[in-house]
């Protein structure tokens, strides 16, 4: 519950003074990509529904009502998280700036670096660093996607996708404050595993926000703010091991 609360706190911090210029560009990127994602996903669902109805014999029509919800939920979560990954890769430099500013507001005396001293080379290269997370995501997503097509076992696929997406979203947004403190991707994963209830609570709420129309456009900057506040307050820089 505490982790989920930080994601909601991120939403409340969006209009906070001093954050507008750091929120604007990530918000615009999210609106464009998620708008495209919603339009494309709707078309794919319609196509799959037509194919499924044409493929199933009449006496198996009842399977349409069993397979469709499982497939729809699995694909919805997978696609929305995939668009989140792309949005974060494109917005990474701006999200790093946003995380710096939030930490300055949350802990004025304990920030790792003032925003004016940011290494711009690091910010430009930050999308490349996100490729590690993308490869990590692909390495786990492919087996889960294949599992969705295995009869009987695929009933568990939506639950596994929810847990995996919550973990990946928490890992995605933790990178901005934790990378600013010098933690590598491996160290970040270790830290999040040590605090897995907080991590999954936060990631689960971010996932829910991405699935709510209109709110999903605000999810990315809100999650950056929430993750920064969470790790700044729960695990101060001096407490990171």
Image (tube, grey):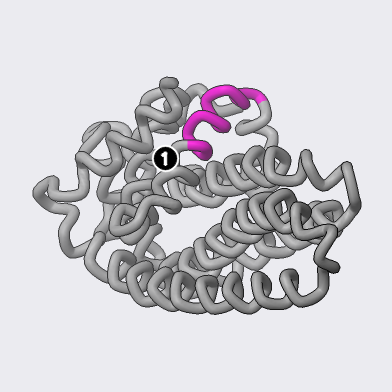
Q: At which x and y percent is residue 95?
A: 38, 59
Q: Residue furthest front?
A: 59
Identify the image quadrant of residue 28: bottom left
Q: Is 233 placed left or right of 143 in the picture?
A: left
The number of numbered badges drawn on the structure is 1
Q: Which residue is mark 1?
A: 227
Q: At which x and y percent is residue 101?
A: 26, 50
Q: Residue at x 72, y 49 (%)?
A: 66
Q: Is 165 placed left or right of 60 in the picture?
A: left
Q: Main secondary structure of the magenta part?
A: helix
Q: At which x and y percent is residue 86?
A: 53, 70
Q: Is residue 141 visible?
A: no
Residue 201 sits inside the magenta stretch: yes
Q: Residue at x 33, y 66 (%)?
A: 26
Q: Which residues are magenta?
A: 194-204
> Which secondary structure, mark 1?
helix
Q: Is residue 63 visible?
A: yes
Quadrant location of the C terminus? Answer: top right
Q: Nearer the viewer, residue 3 or 208?
A: 208
Q: At which x and y percent is residue 54?
A: 76, 76
Q: Residue at x 52, y 39 (%)?
A: 203
Identify the image quadrant of residue 44: bottom right
Q: Residue at x 65, y 70 (%)?
A: 49
- Is the residue 112 above or below the residue 210 in the image? above
- Is the residue 84 above or below the residue 110 in the image? below
Identify the image quadrant of residue 11: top left
Q: Is 4 placed left or right of 133 in the picture?
A: left
Q: Is 20 placed left or right of 122 in the picture?
A: left
Q: Nearer the viewer, residue 190 or 168?
A: 168
């Amino acid at each position: 519950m505490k982790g989920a609360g930080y994601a909601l706190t991120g939403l409340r911090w969006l209009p906070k003074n001093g954050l507008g210029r750091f929120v604007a560009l990530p918000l615009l990127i999210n609106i464009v990509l998620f708008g495209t994602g919603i339009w494309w996903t709707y078309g794919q669902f319609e196509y799959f529904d037509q194919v499924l109805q044409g493929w199933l014999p009449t006496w198996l029509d009842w399977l349409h009502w069993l397979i469709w919800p499982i497939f729809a939920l699995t694909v919805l979560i997978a696609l929305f998280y995939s668009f989140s990954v792309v949005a974060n890769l494109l917005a990474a430099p701006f999200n790093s700036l946003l995380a710096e500013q939030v930490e300055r507001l949350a802990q004025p005396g304990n920030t790792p670096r003032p925003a004016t001293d940011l290494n711009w080379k690091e910010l430009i290269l930050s999308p490349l660093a996100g490729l590690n997370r993308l490869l990590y995501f692909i390495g786990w997503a492919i087996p889960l996607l294949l599992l969705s097509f295995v009869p009987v076992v695929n009933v568990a696929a939506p639950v596994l996708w929810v847990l995996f997406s919550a973990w990946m979203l928490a890992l995605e947004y933790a990178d901005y404050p934790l990378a600013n403190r010098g933690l590598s991707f491996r160290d970040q994963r270790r830290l999040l595993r040590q605090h897995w209830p907080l991590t999954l609570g936060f990631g689960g709420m971010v996932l829910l926000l991405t699935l709510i129309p209109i709110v999903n456009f605000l999810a990315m900057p809100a999650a950056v703010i929430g993750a920064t506040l969470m790790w700044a307050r729960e695990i101060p820089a001096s407490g990171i091991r």
